[in-house]
Amino acid sequence: MKNTRTLRLVLGDQLNPAHSWFKKRDDSVTFLLMEVKQETDYVLHHVQKICAFFLAMRQFASYLESRGHNVLYLRLDDKNNVQSIEGNVRKIIKAYEYDRFEFILPDEYRLDRQLKKLSQELSCESKASDSEHFLTARNEVNEFFKNRKEYRMEYFYRYMRKKLNILIEENKPVGGKWNFDVENRSRYSGQVPLPGMFNFNNDATDIVDLLKKYKIKTFGDIEPERFIWPVSRAQSLKLLNHFVEDQLANFGTYQDAMTTDNWLLFHSRLSFSLNTKMIHPAEVIERVIREWEKRPEEISIAQVEGFIRQILGWREYMRGLYWKMMPEFAKMNYFGHKRKLPDFYWSGKTGMNCMKQAIGQSLKYAYAHHIQRLMVIGNFALIAGIDPVQVDAWYLGVYIDAIEWVEMPNTRGMSQFADGGITASKPYVSTANYINSMSDYCKSCHYSFRKKYGDRSCPFNSLHWNFYHRHRNKLSGNPRLGFMYKNLDKMKKDERDRILKQAGLYLDNIEDL
Ligand code: FAD
Ligand code: SF4
């Protein structure tokens, strides 16, 4: 009798060496990884994002081979590569006469549908397995909120803390509070030394050459000989160590701070390693707690809780919302915003220093931290009324960690309020006041953060009020925004008119800002 032969597909964000698939060697199984134009081209990508994925996939394929597994790796330039996942799977199953096709459930809706359809159409048997990565099931967030009035991350986060017994003592939160957010909002002005930058010297020259040869369109900068992102589990663990040893003690305190001198501050930069599954969220949390227990004098509970909330709370919560709202999510546009994304999102060339810095570093490193993404770049897009489809595409392309399941709820939901308030209870918008309080950007800006209208007045000021003015019908009933409308209505008519006129002028000449 002929032995059953199985083809197992490993996607670029499924590089989880601890997955049960890889536990034991089996000669009848072949693991397939592929570099395909389908994935380089579904959105315009930052060159570093493609390099990071391809390098990590190549490392992972070598790792599997070194453990004795059968691996079929299709490079972008492989003559048998038909450049789509579906096409390659069909071709390989036929050519090598596989009897079974298996895949790990993708985290992205687009691929989820594609693989489901493919497996139904194949004449051989097929099976899907869990990714064994997340701390919740796909529908757990939805189930949790089934009988509640509104979705709020905080409730879910407390449930997760209890469910997994993390930072819980005698059924109560360690430190006496669930959330230390109010302690975590300091501006950085040199109070503590900045941590050293921990970069890798990976070689991405081969991939950059391939992208050129195959005319794959990309944007953004790269130093191919000194590629800074972690592309293996070993490198990811080194980055995690660096974070807990050098950054964790100040993570929470400066979590919202922004500075011209340093693009990272105390953020971990672990999102690419996590999202490709080279490291597991539980091991990150466990490592953080271990370090805190080792150095309780230096690392406060506020830092530890602040960090764990991001991974245990926000990350799982966003994934749950994505699966609840897809595919409708991708079309949501609560405010009906239609304006084109300004060209300076692609060049960083603008007189608004905060945008220049935050976009500039996104183009240079494929990275900006949360507050830069939310309260600078996203804030501007929302108050300027940019089409959320274009905003989503930009975020999905530019960031090293951008995979739709986490990019979309953060961008379309949290940052653009395009879901009308499911992800966030109110829009994340601000005037220059907030940006000035959390950064040093305003002091060297062409615009004046104090001025609401007139020559060199900060665009964030007039556009912010214009946003509330034009969406009064949709927002004035929001209990969290009553004070905002009170302030708008309290303004002298003349002042309000000038602000709104200034906003109109800026919007008409948005490319010149
Ligand atoms: P740290 O600040 O060190 O945080 C640690 C980890 O917590 C991160 O690595 C990440 O895994 C997790 N985390 C923190 N905040 C969030 C969040 N809001 N949602 C999910 N996980 C979170 N994150 C992505 O991974 N991919 C994206 O495409 C993405 N797009 C975003 C778009 C917008 C508009 C906004 C406002 C946020 C977005 N985020 C995204 C969330 C967050 O900004 C990034 O996870 C974080 O900046 C990554 O850098 P870090 O690893 O240094 O994070
Ligand atoms: Fe940004 Fe306005 Fe400050 Fe300039 S003044 S950095 S545009 S917030």
Image (cartoon, rainbow, N blue to C red):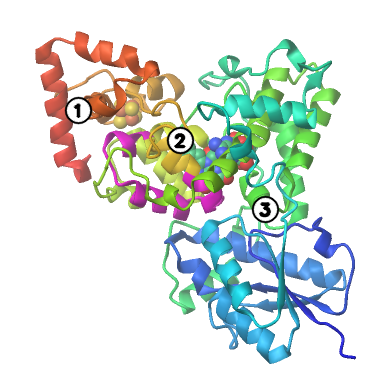
Identified at 52% across, 67% down, the residue is 39
Q: Which residue is mark 3?
A: 230
Name the one closer to the observer, 454 or 273. Answer: 273
From the viewer's perspective, is residue 91 above or below residue 199? below
Do labels 3 and 2 touch, CB within 8 Å? no
Q: Is residue 176 visible?
A: yes
Q: Is residue 392 magenta?
A: yes
Q: Which secondary structure lies at badge 2?
A: helix
The image position of residue 424, as x and y in percent, is: 46, 30
Q: Position of residue 67 (x, y in %)?
A: 87, 69
The part of the chain drawn in magenta is: 379-408
Residue 237 appears at what percent x and percent y?
A: 76, 47
In the picture, the disc for residue 456 is: 1
Q: How many marks?
A: 3
- Find disc 2 in the rendering and name its residue: 414
Give the class, few, some or many, for how many residues have Cα within 10 Å of label 3's Cα (few <14, many ≥20): many
Amino acid bearing label 3: Pro
